[in-house]
Image: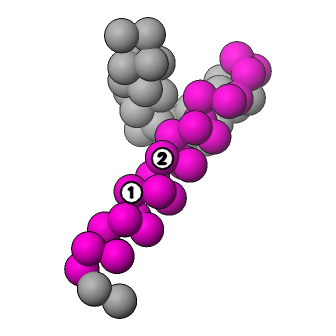
Amino acid sequence: MTPEMEQRVSDVLEARWDGSLLALDANERETLVGLLPHLGPVIADLEENQAA
């Protein structure tokens, strides 16, 4: 794979991850952040960027 192909794959996977976080309902997000607190600010940033 070329570096460009690797970057494209990485970008697509990251977009899918971001979408999966945004698709969680409030209870699921609370549970996830309870287990992985560092995701709280990540989810907040995604929500803010989605609203903009």
Front residue of 5/20: it is 5
Residue 24's spot in the image, x, y percent?
70, 29
Residue 15's label in the rendered image is: 2
Report helix, strand or loop for mark 1.
helix
In screen coordinates, is 52 left or right of 33?
left
In screen coordinates, is 28 left or right of 38?
right
Q: Which residue is mark 1?
A: 11
* Figure check: 23 above or below 15: above
* Figure check: 15 above or below 2: above
For image coordinates 39% across by 14% down, the residue present is 48
Residue 14's spot in the image, x, y percent?
45, 52
Residue 26's spot in the image, x, y percent?
70, 17
Amino acid under disc 1: Asp
Image quarter of residue 38 = top left
Q: Is residue 19 magenta?
A: yes
Q: Main secondary structure of the magenta part?
A: helix
For image coordinates 65% across by 24% down, the residue present is 30
Q: In the rendered image, which quarter contains the N terminus?
A: bottom left
Task: Please indicate, yes or no, whether residue 40 appears anywhere in the rendered image.
Answer: no
Report helix, strand or loop for mark 2.
helix
* Figure check: 41 above or below 9: above
Amino acid under disc 2: Ala
In screen coordinates, is 7 left or right of 14?
left
The range drawn in magenta is: 3-27
* Figure check: 15 above or below 23: below
Q: Residue furthest left?
A: 3
For image coordinates 37% across by 65% down, the residue present is 8
Q: Residues within 10 Å of mark 1 (few under 14, many from 20)?
A: few
The reply to whether discs 2 and 1 touch (Cβ–Cβ < 8 Å) is yes
Task: Please indicate, yes or no, whether residue 39 appears anywhere in the rendered image.
Answer: yes
Q: In the rendered image, which quarter contains the C terminus?
A: top left
